[in-house]
Image (cartoon, rainbow, N blue to C red):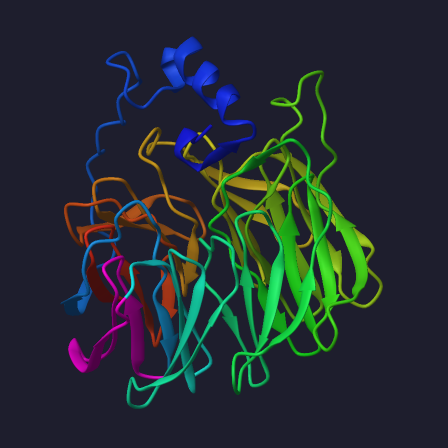
Amino acid sequence: MKLSSLRVVPLVAAVVLAAGCSSLNPFSSSAPKPAPLVDVQPRAQLASQWRADIGDAGSYRFQPAVWSDSVFAAAHRGDVARFEGGNAVWRVQADKRLSAGVGSDGRLVVVVATDGTVIALDAASGAERWRTPVGAEVLAQPAVSLELVVVRASDNRLIALDARDGSRRWVYQRNNPPLALRSFAGVLIEGPVVLAGFPGGRLAVINAANGGAITELNVAVPRGSTELERVADVAGPPVVGRREVCAVSYQGRAACFDTSNGNALWARDFSSSVGMDRDARFAMITDDRDAVHALDAYSGASVWKQDALARRQVSRPLIVGDYVIVGDLEGYVHALERETGAFAARDRSGSRPIAADPVAFGRGFVVQGKGGDITAYEVR
């Protein structure tokens, strides 16, 4: 279990949990140490295309956004920038401490301040277009489309704003269980619907026009005799394919559903606090013990497991061509062979953890570390 990702309500329960179990307490001297890095016999090259810096993330997780040749990034102190080829096309100050970002559709660049102010900038120039207070803490990257900006509050409300002027369009809210992951996972806008995972293992399909619930898919069913054992929250954003949507939960399952009728295509017992990726052949999952798994995309059957990164706080996986990319707590980027899970290449992008998801970029990907270092890679 990744304790840094767990939000326990009420707070007293979190204190008791940390004090009563030193093996789960990151401040305990007896906490398990990260696995040492195994030697890699290079079968590929992680070629750095460019590097840039945006600033420290503080205690938050800032996700870079990619549009065409541009990478948009933000930092806790309020810096927001657009990079091309490692050079800043523009860099502005939001004049507020930030807690979430970046969301972009190539026209708007959206971040959120620690006081709950959503700030939208022009993607071409960095000029401010609007700012709207939503009265809630936001930790997840906003979702942006031509018409909407959707932010996920830390209490799991979804708040939709008009992309033109920031006016409120709708709020989606559902009942939450007493305990839930402190989620940095954003939501997806897919045409006429919004997709979002929720505590209790539910994947909601929401009408983007009015915020009405269309259906809910059961990724997992909470199990156990205590509230802690029953935490089964959807982790990471859902993954959408041509005819399916997939998600994975903490202490629950990984599952894929037919988008035409909502029927489950397959489900497997799994536990992840960071999420999954999928292509036409494999579903890739980082589990809560930091092992990376490949499952058959159409049956959920296990194909391979790479468990040599135990306790290294491995990121959500990203499939890039013939490789699977993950980052870790020491700033290392690992490329695994997609077919076998064997280590193919490794590079250190910085000295701070890579907590944000690697993001596809051109023929490669981009990573942003907690220290603000941004690296664009190609796998050769």
329 with respect to 347 (left or right): right
Image location of residue 303, percent across then percent down: 55, 42
Q: Residue 257: percent from the left, percent from the top?
A: 74, 56
Q: Toward which corner of the image does residue 278 lie, by quadrant?
A: bottom right
Vertical comparison of 143 with 12: above or below: below
The picture places residue 31, in percent across and down from the top left corner, at: 30, 17
Magenta stretch: includes residue 321: no
Splitting the image into 4 quarters, where does residue 319 fall? bottom left
* In front of the other: 61 or 262: 61
Between 38 and 195, the one lying in front of the other is 195
Seen in the picture, residue 297 relative to 330 is either above or below; the reply is below
Q: Residue at x 41, y 34 (%)?
A: 290
User: How far across and down, in percent of the image, does residue 370 sit?
Assistant: 25, 50
Q: In the picture, which quadrant includes the C terminus?
A: bottom left
Instruction: Tell me the quarter of the picture where residue 4 sits.
Output: top left
Stretch in magenta: 68-95
Q: Is residue 173 left or right of residue 286?
A: right
Main SS, magenta residues: strand
Q: Residue furthest bottom?
A: 124
Give the residue drawn at x 40%, y 57%: 115
In this figure, what is the number of numbered marks?
0
Residue 93 on the magenta span: yes
In this image, 377 relative to 152: left or right? left
